Amino acid sequence: MTVVKEPHGAHGAGEEPLDLSDPRLSRFEIVREGARRDDIEIVTYESQFPGPNTRAEKRIERSIALMFLVAGLLGLVFLIAYIFWPWEYELGHTTSDYYTPVLGISLGLALLAIGFAILTWAKKLLPHEVSIQDRHEAMSTDEDRQITGQTMLFTADELAIQRRPLLKGAVALGLTPIALAAVAPLIGGLIRSPHKPDRGQDPPMFRTGFDPVPNQGKLVRLTREDGTPIRPEDVSVGGQITVFPGIPHGATNEYADSPTLLIHLRAGDASVARAATDGDAKNKGAMWGNYVAYSKICTHAGCPASLYEQQTNRLLCPCHQSQFLITENARPIFGPASRRLPQLPITVDEEGFFVATSDYREAVGPDFWERP
């Protein structure tokens, strides 16, 4: 057991500072000299083991190595899941439901294992040191910087990584997958498209219940929550109604992205809205008469934007107070939303009921970076 004790004070009377250029000085002597110059008293500096390579030290070393290896294994699980898991979004309960939990759990446990390994190394393997320092302020000199550098190198020596090959290999094997796991999400989306076409169509994230393809190519009617279709005369002038796709389970959470607000504009407001709609490349021809339909899913955080002000033609989201101007392609004019509400192109079928001429021409819901 090694114990180093020094009396308090920078240097005693008549005691000169050590010449740091003296090649006979050990690294610890330079560290101790730096402590003296900073008015630091090293009260105790002692190893936790009676000697090097003891049985107790080897046991702690193996425990730390095991933690690093477990961290590396979990990091490898993260990488394998991130690269090879069939993670594309699918409707219903599928294996893709476990993609994000596997990533989160594996990476979280890996970081936890690294944290425990570092704490164990510091608490159980490094020497104990107790020092007392008087607070003072001074500019750093060249010698101060030399002392600091030697102190850092001395600390590295005390980690004893060079004489502990087991820990050296465990650290390398454990931290390499974690480093790759940190880089993988940054470049993964640049390697391949995050969405693949489904039977030649846009992936499910870009389709709603108004898509006619799953409906055997038939145009989907706009219906009430109970599934009854809606005629133009069912919506009074200046009024609005929430509509759903007229397909099985169209008003359930299976099609939670499909709720739409059908609005019957007054004649003057409708002419302004029609001019704005026809002047937009995506929305051109989407209105029918004085009727317009917009997604009810706010583009900020996905809340239901359902508070319609008839006099101002503003649609308000109650969650974060975003406001959309209906007569200008539902352009956001207030609040945190930065993208307009997607418009559903509508018409009336031969039986006089509202139908969607196609699915939404823009992705509904909040913005996300993969959105085209």
Image: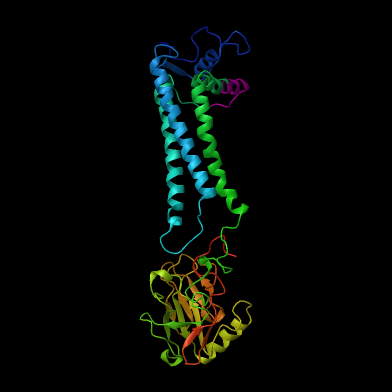
At horizontal 48% and vertical 42% (from top left) the residue drawn is 77
Q: Nearer the viewer, residue 133 or 61?
A: 61
Residue 191, horizontal then vertical, whole percent:
62, 52
Of helix, strand and loop, which mostly describes the magenta segment?
helix
Q: Is residue 146 magenta?
A: yes
Residue 114 location, x and y as percent?
45, 34
Display colour scheme = rainbow
Q: Residue at x 42, y 45 (%)?
A: 105
Assign the N terminus to one quadrant of the image: top left
Please determine whether, in this image, residue 150 is positioned above or below residue 214.
above
Residue 88 location (% of width, % of height)? 51, 58
What's the magenta region? 137-149
Whether 193 is drawn above or below 21: the answer is below
152 versus 184 height, above or below: above
Asked whether 349 falls inside the magenta stretch, the response is no
Residue 140 vs residue 116, the one in the foreground: 116
